[in-house]
Amino acid sequence: MPAPLDTPRKATASKADKEVLFKGVTCALIGLVILLAPYVARSASVRDLMGQAALVGWFALVLGIAFGVQYGLRRAKAGRRQP
């Protein structure tokens, strides 16, 4: 019989995993929007502004990918623990 504390731990871990996935998808989308905005914007001033924010876009994209990798590693680790 499993210990009664196992279920809340699993629920907490699952919630934390979902939060990491949400952060990863959000950051990656923000990064993509910032990086693609200069090619889609109609106004020259907006194109210039978004072109200067390319470093921020790359940072957000890489951070989103890192969160996604962290989510994948957590899921793989949790999958190995279960029989």
Image (cartoon, helix red, strand yellow):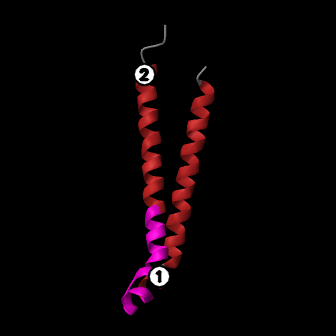
Query: Looking at the picture, does residue 83 appear above or below residue 44?
Result: above
Sequence order check, earlier mark of 2 and 1? 2
User: Residue 32: image x %, image y %?
Assistant: 48, 68
Mark sitting on residue 15: none
Residue located beneath label 1 in the image: 39
Q: Tell me how far mark 2 sits from mark 1, CA to CA.
A: 49 Å
Query: Looking at the picture, does residue 6 appear above or below residue 18?
Result: above
Element type at marker 2? helix
- Density class for disc 2 (Cα within 10 Å; few <14, some 14-19, many ≥20) is few
Residue located beneath label 2 in the image: 7
- For the image, the number of numbered tags is 2
Residue positioned 43% across, 78% down in the render: 37
Q: Which of pointers 2 and 1 indicates the residue nearer the eye? A: 1
User: Residue 53: image x %, image y %?
Assistant: 47, 79
- Density class for disc 1 (Cα within 10 Å; few <14, some 14-19, many ≥20) is few
Query: Looking at the picture, does residue 32 appear above or below residue 12?
Result: below
Element type at marker 1? helix
Q: Is residue 31 magenta?
A: yes
Q: Which residues are magenta?
A: 29-48
- Image position of 81 (left or right of 51): right
* Residue that lies at the very extreme toward the top in this rendered image: 1
Between 40 and 65, the residue placed more toward the observer is 40
Residue positioned 44% across, 82% down in the render: 50
Which quadrant would the C terminus be assigned to in this image?
A: top right
The majority secondary structure of the magenta stretch comes to helix
Q: Is residue 42 magenta?
A: yes
Circle 1: residue type: Tyr
Residue positioned 49% across, 75% down in the render: 35
- Looking at the image, do the residues carrying marks 2 and 1 touch, with CB atoms under 8 Å apart? no
User: Residue 9: image x %, image y %?
Assistant: 45, 27
User: Residue 59: image x %, image y %?
Assistant: 53, 68
Circle 2: residue type: Thr
